[in-house]
């Protein structure tokens, strides 16, 4: 059984970042990255639907240590994937990845202060061991998207496509397309397909807040002409972080004014009746994630008559399209079910501690990255109101702080432990359907530090980069039995 100090699960944007931080801050520690798929990149390798892009700017979605230098701040999927791969190759992180290793089980031994990790590779189980397990496997199920069943689906004569499993052979030239959904995926697909389809209709149950933004950041591109790339990148990154935090906090404190502001921005692009019927949500700004429209592409497609929006509910499918509960029908050759993700906690790995199966839904989350009474285990989970990588970078740095503290103190185990009463609250305070459907399977957060999950980069920066590593955790050094010592010697 191969043994390393740290096993990272997942070679997406978080896992590659973890590899860099481990090499940079813990150069005396060995690590491997186990990736279930055949290539790195995670989301950016999996999704292949038309127009796939980020809805976060690359100055905050990019790594803190590797400047984004492309002209477009709102980048497409292939460019983001290339960025991740270039970063992995530049720092030699790719040499630590074992592809085709889908992790299924992780078992902790207190005696050995060691995780045994089981993965399936080429149809057989293989095992590895490590002292610290770092889960960077994302937050949704790669094998299954959220896909409601609709009455009459079998009658539909065309093709029904889920964006998570986009077929390479789909030809939509001159076709009538209905995209079900109003989230980030739908508002990305609609304008892209509208370029060549006969007509694309976005069918939504209810409106979502949608804002337009230039795909290129003029200030950032100008700064790069006169400043070193790292300095320009850092300045733009901080500007975008602070502006995002300001807008989010202002929206939460002044919801009426925030709604007026967003709808006022829409008035620059769409007629008032369309805004009132299809782009005025019932909820407040940032109760759910905002959808980004780069360069007004969705609005331009609507104004050009290549796309439209229908707000209604589905009664059934028939051979030629969709019948709505209002009595109207939408003719379609292709139906795209952009109905969301299926959230998944740590890839549904089964965890055991000293032989006892642990359900992480019964735990409390510690500093947004660890779990009560779970030793030497951390996970990377990004923000709902900002770029994923902002939190991932902080989490990776904190894991390295813990590893270095353990080495310095000569201890082998660190465990978040609750002292006193703790009132539970949902892990995420968000009303999006894909979140509310899954929260019962996620850990809880508490009503006090360090058991609260912040959606605030500055608070997390303070807590994770400068806060005490002893707050809420117990560092310990279990004494192994003679059998365990011998086994550990053989593994080393």
Image (cartoon, rainbow, N blue to C red):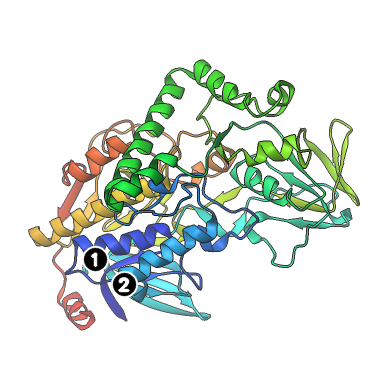
Residue 324 image-quadrant placement: top right
Above or below residue 242? Residue 35 is below
Report how many numbered discs are placed on residues in the image: 2
- Classify 10 Å Cα crowding around label 1: few (below 14), some (14-19), many (20 and above): some
The tag on residue 23 is 1
111 to the left or right of 239: left
Label 2 with label 1: CB-CB less than 8 Å: yes
The tag on residue 397 is none
- Write the residue at 41% across / 79% down: 126
Residue 108 image-quadrant placement: bottom left
**For this rendering, which residue is in front, 429 or 354?**
429
293 to the left or right of 109: right
For label 1, the SS is helix
In the picture of the structure, the residue carrying the numbered disc 2 is 92
Which numbered disc, 2 or 1, marks the residue closer to the eye? 2
- Write the residue at 30% across / 41% down: 235
| Direction front: furthest residue | 226
- Write the residue at 42% across / 22% down: 250
| Residue 63 locus on image (x, y percent) | 35, 54
Label 2 to label 1: alpha-carbon separation: 9 Å
Above or below residue 129? Residue 305 is above
Asked whether residue 10 appears in the rendered view, the answer is no
| Residue 14 locus on image (x, y percent) | 38, 57
Quadrant where the N terminus lies? Answer: bottom left
28 to the left or right of 352: left
- Write the residue at 38% across / 27% down: 246
Quadrant where the C terminus lies? Answer: bottom left
For label 2, the SS is loop
Say whether disc 2 or disc 1 marks the residue closer to the N-terminus.
1
Residue 296 image-quadrant placement: top right
**For this rendering, which residue is in front, 226 or 131?**
226
């Amino acid at each position: 059984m191969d043994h390393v100090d740290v096993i990272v699960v997942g070679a997406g944007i978080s896992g590659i970042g973890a590899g860099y931080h481990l090499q940079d801050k813990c150069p005396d520690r060995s690590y491997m990255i186990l990736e279930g798929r055949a290539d790195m990149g995670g989301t950016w390798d999996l999704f292949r639907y038309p127009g796939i892009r980020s809805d976060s700017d690359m100055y905050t979605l990019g790594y803190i240590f590797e400047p984004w230098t492309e002209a477009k701040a709102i980048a497409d999927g292939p460019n983001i994937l290339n960025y991740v791969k270039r970063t992995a190759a530049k720092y030699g992180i790719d040499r630590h990845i074992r592809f085709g290793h889908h992790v299924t089980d992780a078992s902790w031994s207190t005696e050995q202060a060691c995780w045994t990790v089981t993965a399936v590779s080429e149809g057989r189980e293989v095992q590895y061991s490590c002292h610290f397990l770092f889960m960077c496997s994302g937050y949704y199920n790669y094998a299954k998207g959220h896909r409601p069943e609709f009455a009459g689906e079998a009658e539909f004569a065309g093709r029904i496509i889920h964006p998570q499993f986009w077929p390479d052979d789909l030809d939509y030239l001159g076709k009538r397309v209905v995209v079900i959904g109003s989230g980030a995926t739908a508002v990305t697909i609609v304008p892209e397909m509208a370029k060549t389809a006969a007509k694309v209709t976005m069918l939504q149950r209810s409106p979502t807040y949608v804002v337009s933004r230039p795909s290129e950041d003029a200030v950032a591109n100008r700064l790069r002409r006169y400043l070193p790339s790292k300095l320009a990148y850092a300045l733009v990154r901080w500007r975008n972080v602070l502006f995002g935090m300001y807008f989010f906090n202002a929206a939460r404190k002044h919801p009426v004014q925030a709604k007026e502001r967003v709808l006022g921005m829409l008035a620059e692009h769409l007629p008032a009746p369309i805004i009132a019927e299809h782009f005025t949500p019932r909820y407040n700004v940032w109760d759910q994630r905002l959808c980004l429209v780069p360069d007004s592409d969705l609005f331009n497609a609507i104004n050009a008559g290549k796309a439209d929006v229908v707000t209604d509910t589905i009664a059934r499918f028939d051979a030629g399209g969709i019948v709505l509960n209002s009595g109207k029908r939408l003719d379609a050759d292709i139906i795209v079910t952009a109905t969301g993700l299926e959230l998944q906690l740590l890839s549904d790995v089964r965890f055991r501690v000293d032989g006892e199966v642990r359900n992480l839904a019964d735990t409390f989350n510690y500093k947004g990255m660890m779990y009560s009474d779970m030793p030497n285990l951390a996970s990377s989970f990004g923000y709902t109101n900002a770029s994923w990588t902002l939190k991932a970078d902080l989490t990776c740095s904190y894991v390295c702080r813990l590893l270095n503290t353990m080495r310095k103190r000569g201890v082998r185990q660190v465990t978040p432990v609750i002292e006193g009463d703790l009132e539970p609250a949902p892990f995420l305070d968000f009303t999006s359907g894909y979140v509310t459907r899954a929260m019962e399977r996620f850990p809880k957060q508490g009503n006090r530090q360090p058991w609260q999950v912040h959606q605030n980069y500055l608070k997390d920066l303070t807590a994770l980069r400068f806060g005490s590593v002893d707050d809420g955790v117990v560092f310990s050094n279990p004494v192994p039995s003679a059998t365990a010592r011998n086994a550990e010697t053989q593994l080393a």
